[in-house]
Amino acid sequence: MSDVLQIVVYGLTVGSVLALVALGYSLVFATSRVVNFAQGSMLVVGGFVAFVFIRSGLPVWAALPLATLAGALVGVVVELVAIRPLGRFDPSTNVGWILTTFSAGLIALDIIKLTIGAEPRTIPALVDSVLGWRGSMIDGIPIVPNDVLIVVAALALMVIGEVVQTRTMAGRALRAVSQDQAAASLMGINTHRVVMASFAVAGALGAFGAVLLAPRLFVKFDNGLLLGIQAFVAAVVGGLGSTRGAVLGGYLLGFVGGVLRVTSSSGGQYEPLVIFLVFLLVLVVRPNGLLGIPSVEKA
Amino acid sequence: MADRRPDFSRREFIEWAGKVGFASMSVLALTSCGGGSSKERASGTNTGGGFKLSGDTMKVGVIAPFSGVGAYVGRIVNNSLDAAVAQINATGGIGGRKVEVVKRDTGTDPAAGVKAYQAFAGDKGVIGILWCGGLGLDESRAQIQRDNMPIVSVFNDLWSGHQLYPEGKERSIFQMIMPDRMAFDLLATYCKDDRGYSKVGLIYDSLLFSTAKGYFQESMAKHGISTAGIETYQLNDADFGPQVNRLRTQKGEALMVWGVSGDTAGIVKQIDKVGGAYVDTPTAKGSAWHPHLMGSPGGTGEHTWADLAGSAAKAGTLTAWHVGGLVYLPSFAIRGWMQKYLKKGVTGGEESPADGLYTLAKAVQTAGTTDRAKIVNAIETMGDIKFASVPFSYSADRHLSKTPDDLILITLERASGPATTDPPYQLGAEWKSTFAAGYVGPTHLVRPTLEANKRAHPAEMDEVLKLGYGTQCTKMPDGSLAKTCKIH
C-alpha cells in the first residue's frame, strides 16, 4: 500500500511539474509548428524575475503576476527575435528556428547571469497552509499544500487551455492557424499576432511554473536545460500541439519515474533508458504522440 | 570558508567538472553542432617560438572553461592567475624571469581541451600546463605521456580513480585538488572514531558522482561501519521521497549525501518533511531516525545548500575540505594579492591555480632548463612549495599535493550564534572578520583533525588556535578542546 501511494504521489507531483513546462512547448508548436527551445530558459527567467520582486519586498503572491507578465514579455521578445525575422517558412524543411530559439534562450540566460547572478535562489511557497492544514503524513509519505497546488494548477491549466481553444474566438483562431496558416490568413486572422500570443502565453506559463515549482526545484539555471529536456520529451510523447497530450505525457513520465524509484534503490539510473524506450515506442506506434493530431498531406 | 560574494563560489567550480559533461551532451544532442571553438587569450606578450631560459618570460598554458555553463570556474582561474602573475612579476619574477599565462577555453567541448593541449604541446616556449577543470584531460593522457608535458591538474581529480602516477602511467601529471576518495575516508574516520556511529547510509547523484558508491563502500569497510542503505538520484530530480523513505527504514545514524548543492538542499528538505532532521549525536544514535548529515564538498561545503534548504539545514552538517582552503587566514597570501591587484575578495579555490603556476615556474628555476623531463624531476624533488596558502610538496611516488593530514572537517553554523549544546561552544573569529551579518555557511571544525593538521601545517594551525578561527568546541581548563560537544 505504501509503495503504491508513494508511486501515486511521485507520479502526480513530478508529472505535474513536467506537464506545466510541457504545456508551453505544446502551445507554441500548435500555432507555429516550431519547437521553442527557449522554453526551458523562460522557466529560469521567470523564476529569477520573481526572486528579484520578492527580494525587493513583495510577497510571493504579488510577485507571481508580475513575474508571469515578465515571462509573457520575454516570450514576445523571443518570437520577435527568433521567429519573426525568418519570415514565412516551412518549419519542416527550414530548420533555422532550432538555432534561433535555442540561441534566444541562451542569450536570455546570459542576461540573467549578468544582471541578477547565477547563484541558485529560493522563493517562498505560494501556499504554506490551506484553512489551517499545513500538510499530512500518510503511511510515512508527506503531502504538503504546495504540492497539491502544483497538481491542481497543471490540471486546471489543461482544462482552461481546452476551453479557450474550443469555446472562444481566440481559441478558434489559434486552431485555424495551427491547421493552416495560409488559409487562416486568408480568412482574416492575423497569424503573426496569434503566433506572438502563443509565445507570450508560453512565456507566462514558464514564469508561473517557475514560481510554483520553486519550493521543490528552487530557482536555478539547471532547471532550464534539464527540466526543459524532460518536459520536451513529455510534450512529444503526449502529442506536440495538444494541451491534453502535454499533461498526459507529463504524467506518463512522472509515473514511469515513480515506479522505477519506488521499486529499486538504483531505479533512477535507468529512468533515461526506460523513458526513451517509451518515447521510441510511442513514436513508432503513434508518430504524432498519444493525443497528437495526425498531419494531413495536402495534394 | 571565504568572503561572501554573490557571483560564484567554491561549490560551483567543484560542481563544474561533472555538470559540464552532462550539459555538453545535452546541448550537442539538441543542436548537433558540436564544433568546439578554442579561443586563445594571452596576457602579456607572446614570445613565439624559440624560448631561451636566460632572461625570457616563462610561458604557462592554462586550459579551463572560460565560457558556457562552467564560466564561473574560468573566473576563479582568471582571478587567481591574474593576481599571482601580477605578484610574481611585480616582485622581479622567479629567478629573474617573469611569467606569462596563455589561456585556452574548453567551453563545454572535450575536443576543445584536446586541441588546446595539442597547441601547447607544439609550442616549445610552453614550460607546462595548468589543467583547471577544463574537459579533455582524459582524452589527452596518452599524448601527455608521450610528450612528458608537465601538467598540474588543478581541479581535475585523477587520484580517486587510481589514475594519478604512480598508479597511472603519466609521470608528468601532478594533482592539486583534494580527492573525493580521501574526503570519504576522513568522514568515515570521523563517524567511527569521533562520533561512534556504526551504521551509515549514502544517497548520491549517479550521474555526476557515479564513483561515490565505490569510495563509500571502500571507506565503510575499512572502518568496520555497516551500510544503512545506498540510494541514487539524478541531477535536478524533483522528488526524493522514495529514496528517503527507504533510508528511513534502514535507520542509519549518519547519512552521506553526495551531490551538488541544489539537490542536496532538496534531499535535506525531504528528510525534514518526514521528521528526520538531525538534532545531535545522542539523538542520531537513538531509536528514531535523525541521521547526522555529511555531504560532498560541492554539496554541503559552502553556503548555497543552506540558503536553499532554509531551516531544514541543521547546524552540525559536515563535509571535508583542506587547510589550504581556509583562505581567510591572514597569513594566506592570495587574499592580499587579490585585494591589492584586483580589488576583489576571495571566494575559495583561488589558492589552487596560483599554487599550480608557481609550482611550474619554480620547477624551471630549480631545474635550470626548460627540458620537460627535468622540470618533472624538479617538481618531484624540490621539496616544500609555499606561495598562495599552505606549503605543499610532491615526490617521486606521490603526485598528489594533499595528504590525509591536510584534510579538515567543516560544519554548518549560523551567524545568529552557535547551537545550544552542553558544554557550549563558540563561533570562530571569521564570523566577525569575514562573514557578513546573517551569514549561514560552513566553517572549520578545528578539534577532530587538529593533531593531524598540526603535523602537516604547524604554523597555520598555530595561527588558527591563537587567533581563534574555526569552531573550536569547548576549551577545557588545561587549554585542550573537549570532545563532548554533542552537535558536532
Image (tube, grey):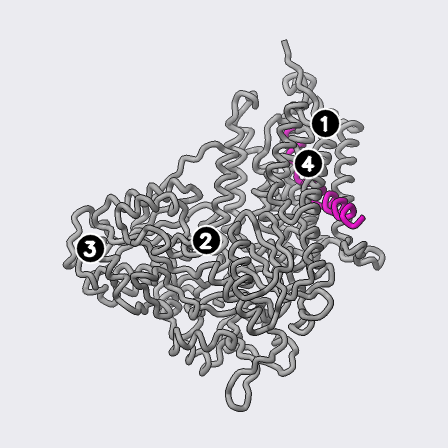
Q: Quadrant of residue B341?
A: bottom left
Residue for badge 4: A23
* Label 1 secondary element: loop
Identity, as a three-letter code, of the amino acid under mark 3 = Thr
**B252 lies above or below B211:** below
Q: Which residues are magenta?
A: A1-30
**B291 lies above or below B427:** above
Residue for badge 2: B72
Q: Position of residue A94 (x, y in %)?
A: 52, 22
Q: Mark 4 and mark 1 in contact? Answer it, CB < 8 Å.
A: no
* Label 3 secondary element: loop
Q: Quadrant of residue B112?
A: top left
Q: Mark 3 and mark 4 in contact? Answer it, CB < 8 Å.
A: no
Is disc 1 in the same subunit as disc 2?
no
Residue for badge 3: B370
Residue A9 visible, this angle = yes
Chain letter of the residue carrying label 4:
A
- How busy is the neighbourhood of tag 4: few (under 14 within 10 Å), some, or many (20 plus)? many
- How busy is the neighbourhood of tag 3: few (under 14 within 10 Å), some, or many (20 plus)? many
Residue at 23% in and 46% down: B123
Residue for badge 1: A291
Identity, as a three-letter code, of the amino acid under mark 1 = Leu
